[in-house]
Amino acid sequence: MWSNPFSRRKRDNPTDHWAERDLALENAPWTPLHGLDDEDYPARGYPSDRYPHGQGVWDDFAAAERYRTGWRRFLPKKLQGRSWLWWISRWIAAILMLFIVLVAYLAITAPLNKSLQPIAPPQITLLAADGTPIARNGAMVDEPVLVADLPEHVLEPFLAIEDRRFYSHWGVDPRGVARAAWTGHGGGSTITQQLAKFTFLSPEQTLTRKAREALIALWLEAWLTKDEILERYLSNAYFGDNMYGLRAASLHYFYRQPENLRPEQAAMLAGLLQAPSRLAPTRNPGLAAARYELVKGALVAAGYITQDEANAMGVPALDVRTRYDVPTGTYFADWALPEARELSEVSYSRHTLTTTLDSRLQNIARQTIERAPLGEAQVALVAMRTNGEVVAMIGGRDYASSPFNRATQARRQPGSTFKLFVYLAALRAGWSPDDTIPNTEFTQGSYRPSNYNDRYSDRITLRQAFAQSSNVAAVRLFNEVGSEAVIETARELGVTSPLPDGDPSLALGTSTMTLLELTAAYAGVAANGFPVEPRAFPIAEEGWFDWLWNGRGSLGNRDHADIEELLRSAINDGTGRAATLSIANYGKTGTSQDNRDALFVGYAGDLVVGVWIGNDDNSPLNGISGGGLPARIWSQFMRGALGAEAAPPKPTPSPDPSGPVEPLDVPDLDDIPLGDGRRLIIRDGQAIIVTDVEGVPVEVGVRDGDFSFEFDEEAAARRLEEELRREGMEAGP
């Protein structure tokens, strides 16, 4: 036990403490104020020879003088006299504390179990509801390898070319670093450092990252055996062609398990690790062969094989049997993939998940969009069941050229389709479809919306205003019920996008949202249960108890019947006549300001479908409005999906002498009923007659004397199957 030389000794007899002090004061030749004149002391304040009894004062001054120079002068005075033993003990304690903090930091930022997980998300295959593969995404990974199961000729090429002294260093190889610095070849990184890099760190090339890499390598070496480190390295390394891990790579390039690889095959795979994408033999066989020769030279230099054995090893032939006949992405797959990752556990195994997508309906949607005269405009379509299961999705005209999903990512103005929330809020507040509201022009106030072509009337029923998409009536109704009620209704139906409070233009759909969000809100009305959450994967059907406590809202019978009456009037008698079907149908058109967005959202049967057309740069559309092309796309999709035929068009009502409402969402003279189920459509200067021939939709076009003829091939095939089935039944016994 060491003692502190600067501490005062305790007196032998503490009880004589006061007596000793009094005696010392009595015999002292000086007082605390004695001898303080400048002449009694030298210039630096030391006691002179004339005061021999001041030796104790002299010692104090000498101690102070001793620490006027050197590193101790930067310390507080109470620390300047500490001994070396005291300082060493403090430094050891600080180093131990730093070590504890470092271990805790590594345990949090670099947990050992992370090196057991694949460094890239494993492959997920998405299936349609009928089992048809629709997309395959993610890395090709497979089960980890065990060093004990691998032959030596499989391990040796990796050790020879990547880390020859792997089994002798402590995670960082100073000789390797020095050799790399001296020769300029190689990075000097050991296998342990490489495992630390691609498991825990980013690929940035900075001194900080290299320092962390070395630190984690030492950490791995302290807690794992050499074989465990090598196993995790080989099970996670990237070998090109989207292959991660030795097992996936050996199966991909040579169709062999790694335990059965031949020496030349193992040497070829070891050579890929330097630059997997560039050296993959499927893409650059010449570069892969050159790298293979370097690996053989490293094997000879390491003493694993002789030069004669190396010369006898030829370039191995590939045996690639993997075929990528499934796309890596689609609009639906990109939307479903994040949820698929959450549903699948983190492991090396591949996953196959069945989605809600209906391959038949998706094909109908694709064919419908391909036939649509879009010009340069973009398009999006979402079809879902009333429970939110998405069965078809089109996010643009061509995924390969533009994977941006306009159904789920584009936020555009919904136009008059937003009026659903305004009128529903009014119905819930006590209004009825037969109640009237002024349809006159706004002449006062800062916000003065107008009807299409400035056509107005004195009063109009809610049914007529909704069907004909009167703007002034919608804004007046919005002001009557209040913005809070409208926003609350939209929120209850599942709209999460920002909705400005107190802005009357909200009634005309000036606030942006996604097509998926809007379609789900209409699904809530169709199901009379909201909010409806769009989903890509089926879920278990709710039990009675779950239904009781799910917190979903619903409309009263009267309110639900009234809003469906308005939606039916819009599609049968109003702006959505081009979408009319022969079965019960409900919907609403929407056209934003300057025709920048054209929409139709509605439902029939158990399908709720939303269609949007617009330009990515938000420029105005050329002659396209919600009641035109979007309504026809919706109708054609529904006819193919539900087997329903288009309803015969109703005669156009005669103008109201009091001033008819000009429908905002009906284009000028591009869809003219001809009677008997026929329509004349003016499309890009071409006259097209649309009709049905024995239930098969047919389009005949005329332009400059040239004729074009198109028909629905699927409908014709179904018609033929029905006739053959009928003939077979009639010919039977």
Image (cartoon, helix red, strand yellow):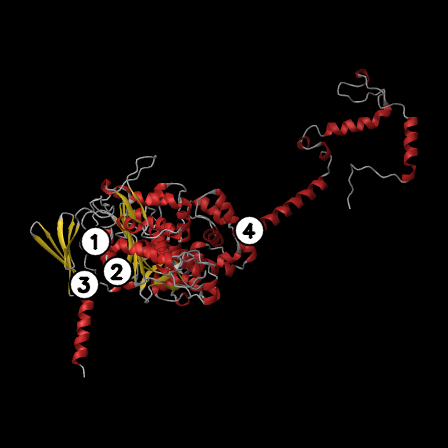
Does residue 476 appear in the picture of this structure? yes
Residue kind at label 1, given as amino acid type: Ala
The mark total stands at 4
Foreground residue among 224 and 646: 646
Does 323 sit left or right of 538 as displayed? Answer: left
Foreground residue among 125 and 358: 358
Mark 1 crowd level (few <14, some 14–19, many ≥20, 10 Å Cα)? some
Residue kind at label 3, given as amino acid type: Glu
SS state under label 3:
helix
Counting residues from the N terminus, which is met first, the one under dot 3 or under dot 1?
1
Counting residues from the N terminus, which is met first, the one under dot 4 or under dot 2?
4
> Is 139 drawn above or below residue 180 in the view shown?
below
Q: Which residue is mark 4?
A: 106
Mark 2 crowd level (few <14, some 14–19, many ≥20, 10 Å Cα)? many
Q: Which residue is mark 3?
A: 713
Mark 4 crowd level (few <14, some 14–19, many ≥20, 10 Å Cα)? some
> Is 326 drawn above or below residue 421 in the view shown?
below
SS state under label 4:
helix
Q: Are marks 4 and 2 in contact (CB under 8 Å)?
A: no
**Mark 3 or mark 2: which is in front?**
2
Instruction: Give the percent coordinates (x, y) of residue 538.
Output: 39, 63
Q: Quadrant of residue 660?
A: top left
* Residue 638 circle label: 2
Does 649 sit left or right of 183 as displayed? Answer: left
Counting residues from the N terminus, which is met first, the one under dot 4 or under dot 3?
4
Q: Which residue is mark 1?
A: 372
Question: Which residue shows up at 38% across the image and 65% down it?
Answer: 262
**Mark 2 or mark 1: which is in front?**
2
Question: Which residue shows up at 67% across the image and 45% down it?
Answer: 93
